[in-house]
Image (cartoon, rainbow, N blue to C red):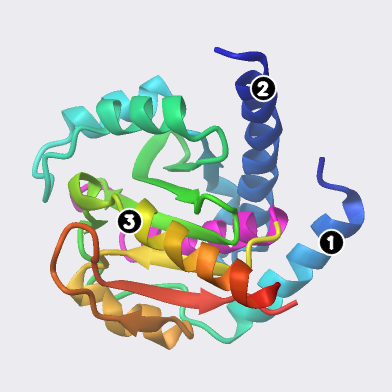
Amino acid sequence: MQGSHKTAEEKYKNIRKIAHEITVEELPYQDKNAIALTDISAAALNAISCAKGRSVDWDWNFGVRSYRTRYPNRFELAIWYSSTVCGLSLGRPSYHGSRVRLDFIERVPGTNNPLVGRVTPIAVTAYEVYARLIDARQVRIISPAEALIEYYTSLNYVFVKGSGSQMNPSYLYKSLEG
Amino acid sequence: MVDEKKIQEVKKKIRETMKEQSMELDNEPGHSGDPINTIQKDVEEKEEENESRNRQ
């Protein structure tokens, strides 16, 4: 790892930690003391890869490795309830840092997941906190699940339909005011 | 580094934002996004370059 990459890695790791802490602190849930947000640890990766009944077979190990190599300013999110991993997400700022993208998110399946229904709202809040901390002007949600578009628009996100090609996916965006 | 003033500003903004929105979903899907096809970098960079040029 080059010196500049290492310096950036440390800087953004610290900002992610602050973003995680602010998000939990401001959550409106009565049981928020049981909720923790962290970077994606080996334990979190193991938990999701072993989970039964997943809706997708995404390779989070590969995704995390790839983002860690390429983007020191990425946003990593593991959402925990006590010692249970409930969801993972990865995203990153755009090249010039004016936007932060939520690239993908997966909720751990099963009725035992205590944060069913809350993983997406927590994640979107965390991305907005991170975006504000790094002075990005916009949050984008890339290739949103159809079922979530109405929810995201209720949060003042604007839907932009893509052409269907890999280079031009649908997304939602929200401008962050001062 | 993020200073304390910035942290307090962000907390205030997020608190205001959360007051207006639902923080619980009835039918939350298991996933969203597309890790295989998230390479929108070129498109975004072009947009940002254009915006930079327009500002200058």
Considering the numbered disc 2 on the image, is that residue within a helix, a strand or a loop? helix
**Looking at the picture, does residue A40 appear above or below residue A129?**
above
Considering the numbered disc 1 on the image, is that residue within a helix, a strand or a loop? helix
Chain ID at mark 2: A
- Closer to the camera, A87 or A63? A63
Considering the numbered disc 3 on the image, is that residue within a helix, a strand or a loop? loop
Q: Residue at x 71, y 32 (%)?
A: A11
Looking at the picture, which amino acid does disc 2 mark?
Answer: Ser
Q: Quadrant of residue A85?
A: top left
Q: Residue at x 61, y 77 (%)?
A: B54
Q: Residue at x 55, y 57 (%)?
A: A126
The answer to whether mark 1 and mark 2 are in CB contact below 8 A is no
Looking at the picture, which amino acid does disc 1 mark?
Answer: Gln
The first of marks 3 and 1 along the sequence is 1
Q: From this viewpoint, is residue A123 visible?
A: no
Q: Quadrant of the N terminus of chain B?
A: top right
Give residue A57's position: percent from left, percent from top.
11, 39
Chain ID at mark 3: B
Q: Residue at x 55, y 12 (%)?
A: A1
Which stretch did the figure color magenta? A109-134
**Looking at the picture, does residue B50 appear above or below residue B2?**
below
**Residue ID for mark 1:** B8
Looking at the picture, which amino acid does disc 3 mark?
Answer: Gln
**Residue ID for mark 3:** B40
Question: Callout 3: few (<14), some (14-19), or many (20+) C-alpha neighbours within 10 Å?
Answer: some
Q: Could you confirm whether marks 3 and 1 are on the same chain? A: yes
Give residue A23's position: percent from left, percent from top.
62, 56
Q: CA distance from mark 3 to mark 2?
A: 25 Å
Q: CA distance from mark 1 to mark 2?
A: 29 Å
Pair 3/1: label in front: 3
